Amino acid sequence: MALYNSILDLIGDTPLVDVSGLSPNPRVRILVKLEGQNPGGSVKDRVAKSMVEEAEKDGTLVPGQTILESSSGNTGIGLAMVARVKGYPLEVVLPENVSEERKQLLAVWGAEIILSPGREGSNGAMRMAQRLAAENADRWFPFQYGNHANPKAHYEGTGPEIWRDCPEVTHFVAGLGTSGTLVGVGRFLKERKPSVQVWAVEPPAGEMVDGLKSFDEGFVPPIFIEHDGYELLDRKTVVGTRESVEWTVRLCDVGVFAGISSGAVVAGAVRCAQKIDEGVVVAVVADGGWKYLSTGAWTEDIDHVVERARGTIYF
Amino acid sequence: MPVDVRLPTVLRQHAGGMASVKANGTTLAEVFDDLVRQFPGLAGQVVTDNGTLHKFVNVYVNDDDVRYLDKLETKVSDDDVVSILPAVAGGALATN
Ligand SMILES: Cc1ncc(COP(=O)(O)O)c(C=O)c1O
């Protein structure tokens, strides 16, 4: 520990912890990178800082300008902290069915919340933010799904940290939202060690996809396409809510209090450990459990928790 | 050998409103050929005319996205569930 000039200097350089006690295969180690240790509480602090500082550098964001972004929570919270410290007003388009704690945290940092329809999920929030940004050209719209500073934060931060702390890595597993984590870290690790396998974990697609009228209304993040996501990923797998909650709870056995998406990612790491003969799996724990206490995941009957989680966005 | 194919809402109009149908094949390509034989309205919807998956469609065998398995050559067997879903932004909703 040391003396820091700004809270923003505490973003990144997160710990990597051996949780091989959860591995079903004695020849496979599992390590988790604890992104909840970031000051704003999630992996998205890295992305928020990176997008804001790139825009300050190239002049697209000027002092006092209002920032407008869509988020299922963590990017909004990270941006809200960075924006507050740097003096930018912030508006966040948030699906109404995210956990209550995510809304509360945005309020803590003084962000203005604009709610989008829950059944449209993150997709709907993104579309609404795109519309609002087009109508309000005075706002700065970082658009995390298409902003190269998003994967860059992982290519220059998360990836090198993993490589520094664990060059033995054979598999990298992370959640897939914007794809920033996977394409940024995936590219960095494969450049150093082409044999590294990159696994994406997704939550199950819910009712949100029912609203689309045709496949042509679908969306693949521009950063995924432009950063060769199709070539970088070796596997993409869906982990259901029950299994995600079960692994979120099991993480406590090794002292890790994490969010529900991390339970999904660790479930993916465990499936990976079952499939391979030997190796070292590095998985990303995107945030801590604090924002999910209201789900009752750790203390209540799992059927009840899964039922309550139905319709809630946790990625 | 029939497999279970789950259809997204946008395709059900072409399959008599059904959410789930049976189709035969040992690879995904064969399964989709059989689907189109049963429901001609599905032609070109999932597999484009040049034989690749539609850009905004994700196809899963059980839990795995077939783009990272063997794409349309991915093998399927009896108990497998094939799910077709539109690609959308970000985390989805928790429903199971
Ligand atoms: C809790 C959580 N897990 C995983 C992700 C996915 O990360 P990325 O957007 O880098 O794909 C996000 C962000 O969307 C998140 O908030």
Image (cartoon, rainbow, N blue to C red):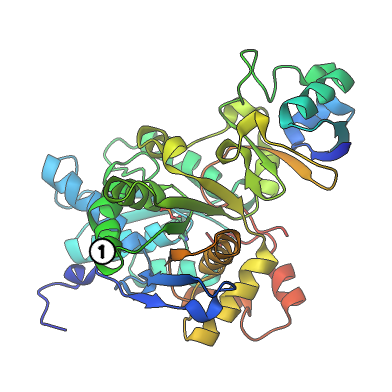
**Which residue is label 1 attached to?**
A161
* Tally of numbered discs: 1
Q: Is residue A190 above or below residue A32?
A: above
Query: In front here: A42 or B38?
Result: B38
Could you tell me residue B3's position as x and y percent? 84, 39
B12 to A185, vertically: above or below: above
The residue lying toward the viewer, choosing from A114 and A252, is A252
What amino acid is labelled 1 in the image?
Answer: Glu
Which percent across, then down, holds residue A255? 47, 86
Q: Tell me the quarter of the image containing the N terminus of chain B.
A: top right
Q: Which picture quadrant has residue A39?
A: bottom left
Viewer can see residue A278: yes
| Residue at the spot 62% in from the left edge and 67% down from the top edge | A244
The quarter of the rendering in which ligand 1 is drawn is bottom left
Residue A221 in view (yes/no): no
The answer to which image quadrant residue A79 occupies is bottom left
Estimate the x, y position of residue A266 in percent, counting from the top left.
Answer: 53, 67
Q: Position of residue A143 (x, y in %)?
A: 36, 43
> Local crowd at mark 1 within 10 Å, few (<14), some, or many (≥20)?
many
Residue under the point 38% across and 58% down: A76
Q: State which quarter of the image contains the C terminus of chain B.
A: bottom right
> Which residue sits at x=34%, y=37%?
A136
Q: In the image, is A60 to the left or to the right of A207?
A: left
Q: Name the element at disc 1.
A: helix
Question: Which chain letter goes with mark 1?
Answer: A
Q: Is residue A66 left or right of residue A101?
A: left
Q: Left or right: where does residue A162 sit relative to residue A120?
A: left
Question: Could you tell me which residue is drawn at 66 percent across and 67 percent down?
Answer: A243
Residue A120 as seen in the image, left or right of residue B27: left
In the image, is the residue at mark 1 within 8 Å of ligand 1 by its beta carbon? no
